[in-house]
Amino acid sequence: MAKVVLTYSFARQFAGGKTEHEVSGQSIRHLVRALDERFPGIGDRLNEDMAVAIDGVIHQNAFLEKIAPDSEVCFIPALQGG
Amino acid sequence: MSSQHYKWIGTRPNRPDGADKVTGRARFGADFNMPGQLVGKVLRSPHAHARIKSIDTSKAEALHGVKAVVTAKDFPEQPNQIVPAGEMQANLRDVTRNVMAREKALYDGHAVAAVAATTSEIASEALALIKVDYEVLPHVIDVDDAMKDGAPILHDHLRTDGLTPPSDKPTNIAKRLEFVKGDIAAGLAKADVVIEREYKTAAVHQGYIEPHATLASATEDGQVQVWSTTQGHFQVRGFCSRLLNIETSQIRVTATEIGGGFGGKTVVYLEPVAIRLSQKSGKPVKMVMERSEVFRASGPTSGGTLRVKIGATRDGRIVAADTTIALQSGAFPGSPVGPACMCSFACYDIDNIKVIGFDVVSNRPKVAAYRAPGAPIAAWAVESTIDLVAEALRMDPIDLRLKNAARKGTKTHYGPTFNTIGMVETLEAAKNSPHYKTPVKPGHARGVAAGFWFNVGADSSAAAHVGEDGTVTVISGNPDIGGSRASLALMAAETLGVDYDKVRPVIADTSSIGFNFVTGGSRVTFATGLAVVNAVRDMIENLKGRAAKIWEVEPDAVIWENGYAKPASSNVGKFEPLSLAQLAAQAGKTGGPINGHAQLNAQGAGPGFGVHIVDLSVDRDTGIVTVERYTAAQDVGTAIHPSYVEGQLQGGVAQGVGWALNEEYIYDAKGRLQNAGFLDYRMPVASDLPMIETVLVEVPNPSHPYGVRGVGEVPIVPPMAAIGNAIARATEVRMLDLPMSPPRLSAALDAMAPKRAAE
């Protein structure tokens, strides 16, 4: 199962205050779906304005990206650049 | 240098657009014209905060030569929700109100109406005939004031996102963020030294030399053409499509040459207005901002208030780091407080971190991106405090940072664990630089600071075409701000094995190449470079197939080497290698034109780190700071064209020097901007700066075939703190607020004088 990490304030707002979650799924799409089943409504927020770091590599629009069973998946605020 | 085994990468040829730019032939935003075009101008609010009770445009419309007038009524209402607009996230309800004020004017300079007329003089006269009935409201400029109970509220609907439980109280605080790693109280309990300070930074503008400019032509059949000085013509298309309810296929946007953007040209101001004026008048409409409009109405970056507390043990190990960052977002939510929070302590491996951020609206122009948005503001406070820790521990500032540097395996406070990064290498390069090894001259003082930026990838498309003579055109869709044409051509030449001057890079309009995300986030050489490499590789497969047909062998029996198709082995047969020109000459007989294409969402941009060293002197009588020597060391991945990498570092430093020493938005008591021009908004000029030395630390990015890492953001992150740290050593005055301008520094020195005299 992948380790999903949420920011502290996001976890308090949408995931009962727990920042780390064990979630099974082969892609970001599956992880988001599984989290949304646990915390209804979190999926829209994760898809809407969050970037994802999979094993330390930041993805701006992750959806189909593969997840290894021991992956670390962190949802972070979306980035912009100058 | 990691580029030794390359033929073209790492070389410094002239840029393909260089001759046009130095001879004045290059066409920038204001250089485009169409027959019969009208002049568009904008009426702007003189009030910082006012309800718009009515707008009477009848006299302006009746003026001879006026062909169209628009107000917010000409732009459809938009939903209050975040939606993709040209692949950026934007609240269209806010974007349309920023383009044209609706219920209220929210800042001095906010657009309230626009006209299109046959001449500039008539357009100005028409603006004067528009009667706006305002109800002036109390305003708020300062971020701390805007957060107070009882502050004038900009948006009645705004509630603070991120509060648990949610609040239903109207507020100017749009968002609260919190990041926690470890246990901050436990960390502080272990500390032998704890330093805590509060800092402020001023809003500063990107200061691009070229003002916003656009030309729009809408025709009766619904098609729209736009020429715009922009960092992202696909974003212009996306925003205009959404704001005006026009299908994207009906809008064709051409990016002109661009005279600087630095993030400030990733949004729209004039383009939707020019299109609407063109639709109403039936004529092309050209709009060019005055410099004062650029300052009053286009996005600066945030100013902010920051508190930082850092605890360290006697041996120099940082055991706790705590910060609160409140950033102005301008009139609508959306400051870079998220990146500011995440970048704050990203340079360091610290067990216990707590970061709280606030996104705060006030009666200022909506902020726009500016190189490494948010990171320089956080670094000003964090790197100043780390310098205080180094002073308290009597440690060399680079040694303290080395002892705490992030490295592969460091778990950041915002979640991800770092892969291969170059923070340690960059610190060591700075420490071993000729600058740091040279003793500080008498009368000078030295400061050091570090900085971090994520870098981004995102969507890019590219194509490569072989001409009938065997030369190559590489087509992409990102405006070239910092030499990207040259970098893309170098990568194409390297991949294809031909000379650089056989490759001509072209930037296509939105109808001539697939989607490309903005030129921003230091992504083009990385992401569009990857698309170009893949397009060339696709073309090479095509070329190998053509050779196979000519030789009547299987395609996998052909290899591509140094610009030639060759048999993969002697078993294939004895064939003379075929050059690009030979294959191109026979293209018609072997299957038609030879092209390659690629499209991708690039991942793995790889973060960058910078360490800056500055030597400076301070005139104690005037408070004037002279930068005597400056060195910027940075982890740049592979320097594809080292001159343009060095230029990015030098440009970032120059802007950082201005941010540190002079630049600020100054408002009067009525909330009106007082310094909307380059005479009063002081940016550095060449005579203010020494030659900025660079140290390129090449730690190749494993996610790119040539190791590219974005370089344009990081160099603006460390300068303010490096300069503040040097000023502290020079004067024993620790400046906590930016800018450290002569009047402020002079006042601080004067305040210090009695204490010094007593000592």
Image (spheres, helix red, strand yellow):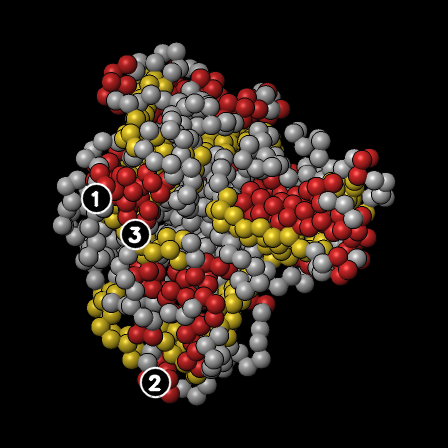
Mark 1 vs mark 2: in front = 1
As displayed, is residue B667 above or below residue B718?
below
Seen in the image, is B264 located left or right of residue A17? right
Image quadrant holding the C terminus of chain B, namely top left
Q: Residues within 10 Å of mark 2 (few under 14, many from 20)?
A: few
Q: Is residue B690 visible to the viewer in this orientation of the structure?
A: no
- Whether residues under marks 3 and 1 lie with C-beta atoms below 8 angstroms apart, the answer is no
Which quarter of the picture shows residue B199? top left
For disc 2, the marked residue is B59
- Which residue corresponds to the image point at 46% horizontal and 58% vertical from the top-left? B235
User: Residue B100: x percent and y percent?
Assistant: 34, 67
Which quarter of the picture shows residue B374? top left
Q: Nearer the viewer, residue B326 or B236?
A: B236
**Residue B203 disc label:** none
In space, the residues marked 3 and 2 are separated at their CA atoms by: 36 Å
What amino acid is at disc 2?
A: Lys
- Which residue corresponds to the image point at 30% horizontal and 74% vertical from the top-left? B73
Q: Secondary structure at mark 1?
A: loop
Q: Residues within 10 Å of mark 1 (few under 14, many from 20)?
A: few
Q: Secondary structure at mark 3?
A: loop
As displayed, is residue A1 above or below residue B44?
above
Asked if labels 3 and 1 share a chain, the reply is no
Q: Is residue B566 visible to the viewer in this orientation of the structure?
A: yes
For disc 3, the marked residue is B333
Residue found farthest to the top: B315
- Which residue corresponds to the image point at 54% horizontal and 64% vertical from the top-left? B511
- How many numbered discs? 3
Seen in the image, is B657 located left or right of residue B304? right
What amino acid is at disc 3?
A: Pro
For disc 1, the marked residue is A40
